[in-house]
Structures are given as C-alpha cells and as structure tokens.
Amino acid sequence: MVSQMAITMTQLRSFLAVVETGSVTAAAEELYVTQPSVSAAVSALSKEVGADLTVRLGRSVEPSAAGKAFAPYAAHVIGLLDQGGRAAREAAGVAERELRIAAVTTAAEHIVPQLVQEFSARHPELALTLDVGNRQRVFREVAGHRVDAAVGGRPPADGQLSGEPFLDNPILLITAPGDPLAGRRSVPVEELGTRPWLLREPGSGTRAMTEEFLARHELQPRMLTMGSNGAIKQAARSGLGVSLQSRAATALELKNGLLGTISLREPLPNRQWFVLWPSTGPLREPVRQFLEFVTSPAAKRLVERSWVGEAA
C-alpha cells in the first residue's frame, strides 16, 4: 500500500494527454514537449501509483484498467488547481472574471444563446465563453473542470456531476410532411419497425435516448447516422426516415409545414433540460450567479418566449 505519493503536475498532464490523444507522439505535440519526456512522466506516475496506467496496442497507447480508474481523479486534480489559480488571480485583480459554459448541440442552438445574452447583459463585467459538443464531450468537460457549468440532459449516475432541471424538453417523432402516418391519431410503434431511423453520432444524448426507446420496444430497424440535427431534419423532410427530436429543435420547421410528426400509441421519452456543474470543489461567484439565473422563472420565460417567436 502506498502511503504517500510524490506526483507532479507534469506527470498528470502527460498521462491525461496520452489518454485523450491515444499516443505518446500526439501527447508530446499537444504539450509541446519531447516524446521521451512524456513517456518518462507516465512511467514515473505509474510507479508512484503502484500500477501500470497505460498499455500499448500496436502503435497506439490506451489506458489500462488501472489507468481508466485513475484518469477521472487526475482530471479532477488538474481542473481544480486550474480553477483555484484562476480564482486567486481574479481575487487579486490581475485577471478578468470569467465564466466558461458548455452546452450540448441542441441546447446551444435553441436555448443557450438567449440565456447567455441576458446573463451577459446583467453581468457585463464577466468574460463568457461557450463550448459546444455532444453529450459525452460536454459531460467530460464539466467533470474535468474544464468548463464551469453546462446546459444538457440529466447528469449521469456516477456522481461526478450535479444538476438541476430548469425546463421541460418535449420529444417528438418527426417525419416527412406528407407521411401517411402523420395524419393518424395513434400509431403503434411496431409499424415503424421497418422504417429507417435517423440518429446522431455516438456520444449524443438523442442517440442514446433513441437506442433506449427502440430496445424497450424490441425494435431493430435500420439506422442511419447523421452528423447534426440539421442533417437529420433535412433527411426526415426528404422521406429518408423518422427521428426522435427535441421540440426546441424542430419548432420552426413544424410551424412552416416542412416536417410532420407521428403520434405514437406508446408514450415518448420524458426529458428535461438541466444546468450542470462539477460535484467536487467550491463554486466561484460567477458560477453561482449563472446557476441562480438559469434556474429562475425569468430565464424559463425568456426561453419560452423565444420559442414562440421562432415558431411565429
């Protein structure tokens, strides 16, 4: 049992870079150091931890079972220290106050712009940044303290993220506007078993939701992967398949008759939008202010008004 570990920031950053890039060469390029220094840092870290943290598979390097278990802790340490340094510089008045926000793609397109605009108007002294990605990436960024808060779906059950729901996220089954099923009041989901289903890329929340929905009803249709919500809507409009999508992402097309919806006999998934933050570490004042704003009735009214205006 290791009673004390002499671990350095260089070792942690080198290990995380190898985990994220999949190779010592790419990690060295990312960190602007030599390959031998990265290899030496990871080897020294493994020695301190008491287990090999990486395994070589051909030309790539992957985290071992021990490395996968250790990586979240390493990310927490690096992230918390970076946040602490930023908080200290802000308190000393040598750096501007900053708030880093992330959002899943649908939220970034239809919810977050209104929230960020209003919050920025209320706090002009803050420098705001917005990072957009799929569910998997956003959750990883928040858990690693690389962003301060995020807007997305329900946080995972692993305890790394805290979250509070602030807005309903109704889900619709979209199709081409001329689809015969769109005119029926109640369609058994089995009738869609032979239809192609349009999905986002792996790591997307809507993809995971769709896969869970199909598995629950024991359907195995042909699935087509699209790279964006826009591509899915165009494909559905052209009759290439059906897709579960957020009402927020389809309001404009539905209002203009560019898409249709199918009313299923079975209930569609219930979803909510959450504001998310890391479960560990103190929250800086700008983060608290953002969380209070997003969960306020004023923020909810702001987003809902924008949806009405978009549909109109």
Image (cartoon, rainbow, N blue to C red):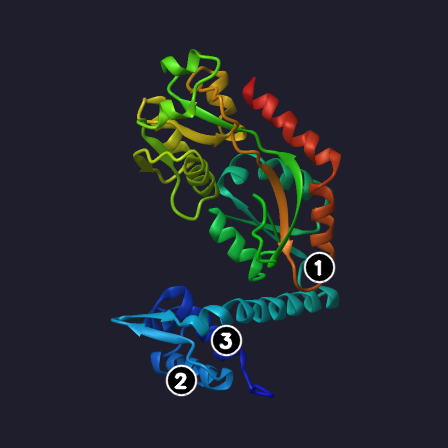
Which amino acid type is shown beneath numbered disc 2? Ala
Q: Residues within 10 Å of mark 3 (few under 14, many from 20)?
A: many
Asked which quadrant contains residue 207, the reply is top left
Front one among 48 and 192: 192
Q: State the residue position of label 2.
A: 40
Q: Position of residue 252 (x, y in %)?
A: 50, 22
**What separation in Å lies between label 3 and label 1 (alpha carbons)?**
23 Å
Secondary structure category for the residue under label 2: helix
Asked which quadrant contains residue 227, the reply is top left
Q: Position of residue 105 (x, y in %)?
A: 49, 41
**What separation in Å lies between label 2 and label 3 (alpha carbons)?**
12 Å
The answer to whether residue 29 is above or below residue 141 is below
**What separation in Å lies between label 1 and label 2 (alpha carbons)?**
35 Å
Which amino acid type is shown beneath numbered disc 1? Leu
Residue at 42 percent of width and 35 percent of height: 229
Left-right relation of 84 to 176: right
Residue 306 disc label: none
Which amino acid type is shown beneath numbered disc 3? Leu
Q: State the residue position of label 3.
A: 12
Residue 283 disc label: 1
Rendered-image quadrant of the N terminus: bottom right
Q: Position of residue 8 (x, y in %)?
A: 54, 82
Residue 178 appearing in the image: no
Query: Of the residues under marks 2 and 3, which one precedes in the sequence?
Result: 3
Front one among 151 and 122: 151
Secondary structure category for the residue under label 3: helix
Query: Of the residues under marks 1 and 2, which one precedes in the sequence?
Result: 2
Instruction: Tell me if label 1 and label 2 are in contact, CB under 8 Å.
Output: no
Secondary structure category for the residue under label 1: loop
Query: Of the residues under marks 3 and 1, which one precedes in the sequence?
Result: 3
